[in-house]
Amino acid sequence: MALAAALTALMAGCGGSGNSEAISERPGYLGDILETAYDGNTNDLLTAGLGASGLASPVAPAFADPLKPTAAELRRLAIHTNYRAMLDMTPAGGYGVFYGPQVDAQGRPTGGEGKIAGTEYLAYADDGTGRRNVTLMVQVPASFNPQRACVITATSSGSRGVYGGISTGEWGLKRGCSVAYTDKGTGAAPHDLANDTVPLIDGTRTTATAAGARAAFNAGLSEAERQAFNTATPQRFAFKHAHSGQNVEKDWGRSTLQAVEFAYYVLNQRYGAPDSSGTRRLRTLNPSNTIVIASSISNGGGAAIAAAEQDTQGLISGVAVSEPAVQLPANAGLSVRRGGAEVPLSARTLIDYTTQANLYQACAALAPSVASTPFAAAFAAGFASPALPIAPNRCASLRAAGLLTASTTAVQAEEALARLRALGWEPESDALHASLAAFEVAPAVAVTFANALSRASVKDHLCGFSYAATTAAGTVTALAPAALAGMAATGNGVPPAGGVQLINNLGKGGAVRDVFSVSADTGLADWNTAGALCLRNLVTGSDAAARRLQAGVDETRRNGHLRGKPTVIVHGRADALLPVNHTSRPYAALNRQVEGAGSRLSYVEVTNAQHFDSFIGLPTVLPGYDTRYIPLHVYLNRALDAVYAHLTEGTPLPPSQVVRTTPRGGTPGSAPALRPEQLPALAARPAASDAIALSAGAIHVPD
């Protein structure tokens, strides 16, 4: 009772709500709440009991029964999978030295396992139909101090499930902050349409009938539609991001704000003072006495920015994000300059530039000028061999379509590379095109977002694409039951993942894995140029399908108004998935245009940094990432440190700047260990040659 009285006094002293009987009400959109306590030894919030050494192990934790994993086993594997998917897990790359569970909140390696005791709460946010079922999760560490209350958001990156933001949540848990997560309406586990099974909130699977409104995702087909679908296209899967029919990106801000509201509810149920009747809890913890930092990376970072823009209740105190995916307004008239030159094309939406990457990247990867970049030789050997000249055929098909003009593969490839630069990619991204093409990143993202923005059903087979398991030769086959059983933990929500591949239904000779398909119109194995052109037409065309997608895009555009919240955005200059010229650079200019002198946004651009830190930690697969790139995650943590210090101590935010890191160098595949001096701090007073200039609608970034 002493704690409750102290908190009541604290609320009054901070202004509170002006109503000592303001009740902590359960949000109406919340479903049943699953509450689980972890002792910090056998199991914990951050590592699922694996500890820092267990997360570092490439050997994934196993299931007792591979066909029937328990919810606890799925959670453990999901944390292992998602943490490793975000970060370089090698000590030479920084794990255990600059970041990781065994590094404390002050950035000091401890040598321990970094397990964090606490309680985890899981629930759906829904509108009552059971069709939305966005997963929300709140973690409250045992070290949470209600007298220094803090919350950070860790919305999932990519198309992942709710644990997709665990590497961001780590920062908060170490600080004793509660962490508010959401899968933002995406998720790793599919609706298996052949067998009519669906995932539940904890990742376990059951029949769609048994799940009913408890399904994390159901494709929403009638039984007759499902049977007809299976007859025409057997062994297919529907995924929530692509096939929910809800254009979930338009709600990513709302989902993040709901996660914050869920956190407030949980915290007040635990720490709030009792009301006068002693039966309910007051809103003792509220925005007047609780720090909330919206954070995450990639799509999750974009969701944090959307939440800040939509925060009419003042729930969010500040923002710290890395490489955010943000969709800018159409025709905003923004100016982006690098060095002495205006960037020719900027501020395009993700579906716009990704459908361009989908067209040109495989061809550009063959350019002689990038032959020494990571995976370029392997890409050429695998995708440009005489036996399987997929990439050269893509170049030829682009020429036939009038998108390239040169007559030889080498010159076409250089032309494609130049086209990507003209479309907004920085020269520093050149070295990444081969590896991203080989990993089929652009096709997977383009197909997923095209479906989502169009509100397409799985039965629409937009542009002839579907998702299925395949044989080694690329033909559709049944997925191994064990792979499906564990996909909530192993998948990332887009193909290729968890044994599911992207399928071209319209290939010559029938449905086959997209990358191996022979185009019906050209008769070439050209990586389905026809499908790529169809996706591009959805962005540029004027037919009904194009208008549907374009309307969906308009629902996802952000307005740049962060409501004066202190914000730090960090982005890697070399990012080839979310290029800086289409995301963070123009967003910073937009924010200054909208907020003027009231803007409190600092933009930090990091050299020698790109989108996928985890790729740096694959020296045997992607040698050269280790010698060229530093972990951007370090700078997300520093951005969080800066915003937290500003909110708690009044420390000024670092000005907008370029941070010039030093890559590790050495021999590709065996780079020397990263050293502190290679990762300079955010400068309180950057040199003139590093200072980024922002004015209304304009940004000038030094070379």
Image (cartoon, rainbow, N blue to C red):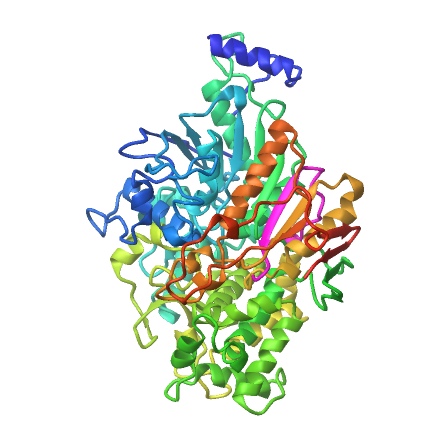
The image position of residue 648, as x and y in percent, is 60, 28
Residue under the point 48% across and 72% down = 373
| Figure check: 20 above or below 131 | above
| Residue 163 appears left or right of 679 | left
Residue numbers of the magenta segment: 555-574
> Can the viewer see residue 91 in this picture?
yes
Which quadrant of the rendered structure holds the C terminus?
bottom right
Q: Nearer the viewer, residue 228 or 662?
A: 662
Q: Nearer the viewer, residue 653 or 86?
A: 653
| Figure check: 511 above or below 352 | below
| Figure check: 71 above or below 275 | below
The image position of residue 253, as x and y in percent, is 59, 44
Residue under the point 30% across and 35% down = 43
The image position of residue 390, as x and y in percent, is 44, 82
The image quarter containing residue 701 is: bottom right
Q: Nearer the viewer, residue 466 or 626?
A: 626
> Can the viewer see residue 27 in this picture?
no
Residue under the point 30% across and 38% down = 49
Q: Magenta-highlighted stretch: main secondary structure?
A: loop
| Residue 59 appears left or right of 335 | left
| Figure check: 63 above or below 141 | below
Q: How many marks?
A: 0
